[in-house]
Amino acid sequence: MSEDKGEYDFYIGLILAISSSFFIGGSFILKKKGLLRLARKGSMRAGQGGHAYLKEWLWWAGLLSMGAGEVANFAAYAFSPATLVTPLGALSVLVSAILSSYFLNEKLNLHGKIGCLLSILGSTVMVIHAPQEEEIRNLSEMSIKLADPGFVLFATAVIIVSLILIFVVGPSHGQSNLLVYISICSVIGALSVSCVKGLGIAIKGFFAGEHVLRNPLAWILLVSLIVCVSTQINFLNRALDIFNTSLVTPVYYVFFTTSVLTCSAILFKEWQHMAANDMIGTFSGFLTIIIGIFLLHAFKDVSFTLSSLPVSLRKDERIVNGNLSNNIYEHLNGNEESSSLLCENEILINENTASRRSGNLASF
């Protein structure tokens, strides 16, 4: 019965995670269109610290879409381990890339399409080999996990790095370097996922009749989640306003997933009982996603499609098999005019080469 319940929870978490990716992927497009409309009106941009986007209904539509996605994501974490839910965020990269090509005129070339496919394949491999986290039944067990020295050290490092990025690095390099704002969102996102996991356990306990509202940990997790999510939204808006959506989304995914997997491994000890093939499969899947995302945005400005490849080959084939073969045919058939032209060209090339060599030697 327990195995059936575990499998049932697995599929619930899987469906919620996939639906979350669609909502979140669409939210990036709605927010970006809202920010672009504000820029055309001459309002202070979010990247410069402005908050005029709060009056734009498209931005609010994107926020609601992201909220729906986060709610689904929240529920998915309650039913499934973080290492199953988080990698499926690659689907939001795919959704965002496809929608941005239609609604934001951000073209998706052949490299981008291959990158999307690799992201999906890598996510599938990670889901198959995802480690199983230790089962936590209530907030008392969650508090023991949170008090673990390894997690306390990790959380302290995350807070210190975040404060340095926000108050020291951000004001000077945030406008020119994408990684600044993305890093802030990502490292804080690791803590927000931990809060979501704890609140998910609290909600399940509440419906089971436990007195979770009297537990201070539930309120601490709720306040921490609000602070973390608010910070993520603020700096993600800045990144979206300054940089290309097809660039922000995949880079954010890589950084965020890495942070969450690291945090989850420290907090839930997911890797202690994994088989070697599952460890290799998990790392291979994640590296495949990173390669796919690199292809998605590294060559985004290169105009290259599938149809251009055979056209290029036909042109090269025509040049090689047509012009060259005609010259050889005319030369072999004793065409004196063609032969003389070829000889003259060869003499000119030799003379030019000799003169260049003389000039180079004279310069010494």
Image (cartoon, rainbow, N blue to C red):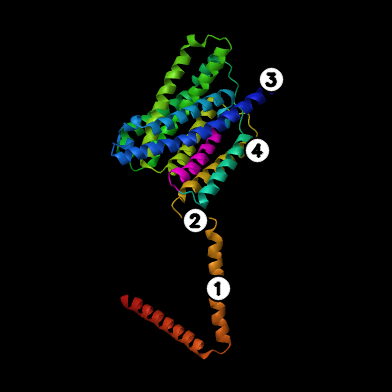
Q: Rounded to the nearest whole Å, what is the CA distance between mark 4 and mark 2?
A: 37 Å
Label 4: which residue?
277
> Quick check: 21 above or below 153?
below
Label 3: which residue?
2
Determine contact: label 4, label 1, CB under 8 Å: no
Hey, which residue is sitting farthest right in the picture?
1
Instruction: Name the residue rendered at 39%, 28% in the picture.
Output: 231
**Of marks 4 and 1, which one's residue comes earlier in the chain?**
4
Q: Which of marks 4 and 1 is in front?
A: 1
**Of marks 3 and 2, which one's residue comes earlier in the chain?**
3
Q: Is residue 261 visible to the viewer in this orientation of the structure?
A: no
Q: In this view, does 179 lie to the left or right of 109?
A: left
- Name the residue type under label 2: Phe
- Name the residue type under label 3: Ser
> Which stretch appears magenta?
86-106
Determine contact: label 3, label 2, CB under 8 Å: no
Q: Which of marks 4 and 3 is in front?
A: 3
Label 2: which residue?
304
Task: State the quadrant of the N terminus.
Answer: top right
Q: Does the magenta stretch include residue 235?
A: no
Q: In this view, does 170 lie to the left or right of 71?
A: left
Could you say which is closer to the camera, residue 133 or residue 305? 305
Q: Rounded to the nearest whole Å, what is the CA distance between mark 2 and mark 1?
A: 23 Å
Determine contact: label 4, label 2, CB under 8 Å: no
Mark 1 crowdedness (10 Å alpha carbons): few <14, some 14-19, many ≥20: few
Q: Position of residue 190 (x, y in %)?
A: 47, 29
Q: Is mark 2 on a helix, strand or loop?
A: loop
Q: Nearer the viewer, mark 1 or mark 3?
A: 1
Task: State the quadrant of the C terminus.
Answer: bottom left
- Name the residue type under label 1: Val
Q: Position of residue 271 (x, y in %)?
A: 59, 30
